[in-house]
Image (cartoon, rainbow, N blue to C red):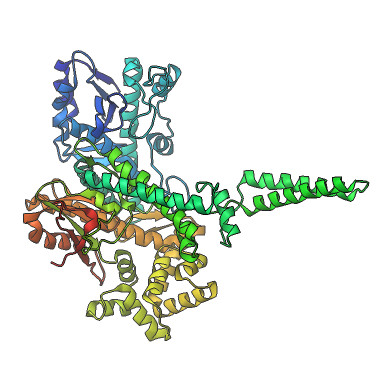
Amino acid sequence: MARHFIRRAQDIEGAVKALSLFNRLAHDTETFGPPGIGGLHPFHGSRAYAHVFATDQDEFYFDFNVGGISREHVGQLAPLFSDSKRLIFYVNAIFDNCMLHMDGIKNLCRIADVPALARIEYSRHGKDDFSDESFLGLDYLAQHYLKRRKNEELSKYIEKFDLYEKDTLGKHIKDNIQGRDIPLFNEVPFDISANYACDDARITYDLGRTVVSRINGKDTEMQGRMIEVARNEISLTSVVLDMKVEGLKVWVPYVERAITHEQAVSARALLEVEKSAPGVNTNSSAQLGAFLESKGVVVSRGNPPPGMLGRALRNEEKARDLHAQINAGDLTEKKTKSLASKLAAVQLAAAKAYAGNYLLDAQELERLAAKYTLPFLKNVVGYKRAQKKISTYYTNFLHLRDSQDIIHCGLHQETAKTGRFSSSAPNLQNLHKEKWNPDWDLVEPMLIRRSFIAQGADEILLFADYKQQEMMVMLDQAEEMDVIQLLLSGAFDDFYLATNAIIKRFTGKELTRQQAKAIALGLAYGQGKALLAHGLGVSLMEAEGIKTAFFRALGRLQTFDASLKRHARVHGYIKNPFGRVTYIPRDKDYTALNAYVQGTSADITKMAMVRLGHPQTGRLVREGFKSKIALCVHDELIFRVKENELSRITPVIREEMSAAYPHKHLQLGVDFEISYRNKSGVSAWGEKVSYDH
């Protein structure tokens, strides 16, 4: 093996030709940014000062930060990214390719994000908790697959010599986007930084080769189609990259108005809170909980953490000592009263510690405000809701936008064990779903999703949503034909109403639609009896009766659920129709149906995204559409549609989204919504209405 350090312009062409001989490469970038930004933010000024490649034997370090070769020469690397048959391994594919984009290079190769492939090879990476989401970093993957550690010499050097951006007083400057220290990579000696980068590229290549090899082996062993899942995930990375680069535009004037509005709402609510409970800190669960209990509100508590438990035990010991002193006698009446007062205080402190902390998150406060007619609670909820809108949403949107008012949020393929996307900076999958009313014209409603608009003057936002995707998948895969026939016949077009009709037919018990929905979702998400009862709003006994009626009517679904649990117990995993394998601890077999439905739904959506939006093979490109996929929100795809393409594109979207699911009996339907231009001339996400076409 050899390392090649390219630091002269005349050496670039030869190195590129040498690398072009390989069908597989690993690629990594080393980056820096302007003052106050650092190297992690391509859309806010960060740029690559080095590009590093690895083949099966050698590493190539292109240094674009020296006198004889500069970033003006980066374009000469373009031939390496022009071969659609070449596979390039990455550990942070979207980031590195955004750096390429900022230098005018579009990657037409097959982009293999190794963490995303590792999640397919073994879904239980990270913690064993099935609901956990874990980013699979280079060091973790290197230890897991290669029994190797990442080179830490560069980070140790930076730490040792305190090589960070500092202010005039020598204090570390935090980057303007994520609040992290900003390392000065350009002050690290070349041999340390270059060898560190080459080691990363080598690990990335070896990881990619190892993970792909394991996927191939498991595909043969399990007689599945894991390879096809991996191929689609590779194609999907190119789609996600395009979405990241394009981003969504922030409606800045609206966001600024929304901040002013929420500040006024917050101030009014806080004034009322202070009138009702002077001195109570609403950000202190202890103070807030104690005040609410004094007003007759039943506040939930959590199990005491170790520190609180220790405090309770110490207070109990004090109580025993005080009790012994009192019982010893020979005390004056004054001393006895004093000790008795202390005893009562430490006993109360012990009881409070054993009770645990008050559970008063935003969701619990909303629940209490709905249950108790207490103006104080209503104002606390209003204050906290307004504060969250300001800090978590509106201010953050302005902070994260680029110079063109575009937000480039992250969609991550590798974090969720089910195969679903996660989202960050900001999390656009988890915005409030306030319902738009098109009749609002006198007062401007402040809805969070209105913050995002179509970019072009000739664009509007179109929303394509799988109709009850998870429930339909569950029915179809279980072949629950009684309900399926009702849906196919047109007697019902709603899963929950059709299910309810079958339950009534078989058991005589009629549920509300909400109850049918709660139990179906509870089943799909692996909920226990307590959560099911809470969702239904009934007792444990009533919940058990409703569940029994549900399964009596939907016997095939119960059989399907049991078969998945049995397979998880026996084999330790389940496999969905696409070939995705989800490993499940044998003592958590109750999550098998959830894993199956979530994984299948995730792959349907991902398949549809590739069929429609792949930059080379997607149908939108093949048929000449200028419209693009802007975002994926669970089972909904958001499109930036050219207005003159609207009537032509909806049948294409419906066809490809439906075809993405290899159904047994029940094809998935697609519902459309649209955001027409409002009085301000923009198409805003939060203003969507039904669109029938």
* The C terminus - image quarter: bottom left
User: Which residue lies at the image location 42% right of the left edge and 52% below the top edge?
Assistant: 269
User: Which residue lies at the image location 54% right of the left edge and 75% below the top edge?
Assistant: 541
**Residue 660: horizontal and vertical position, in percent?**
22, 60
Is the residue 31 above or below the residue 319 in the image?
A: above
Is the residue 555 above or below the residue 22 in the image?
A: below
Count of numbered badges drawn on the protein? 0
Which is more toward the observer, 146 or 251? 251
User: Which residue lies at the image location 81% right of the left edge and 46% below the top edge?
Assistant: 338
- Quadrant in the rendering for residue 595: bottom left
**Residue 488: horizontal and vertical position, in percent?**
23, 77
Q: Residue furthest front?
A: 275
**Residue 631: horizontal and vertical position, in percent?**
23, 50
* The N terminus - image quarter: top left
Judge left or right: residue 239 versus residue 323: left
**Residue 406: horizontal and vertical position, in percent?**
21, 41
Residue 466 in view, yes or no: yes
User: Which residue lies at the image location 15% right of the left edge and 59% below the top edge?
Assistant: 653
Residue 250 in view, yes or no: no
Which is more toward the observer, 398 or 29? 398
Which is more toward the observer, 37 or 65? 37
Judge left or right: residue 382 versus residue 83: right
Q: Residue furthest top?
A: 67
Q: Residue furthest right?
A: 330
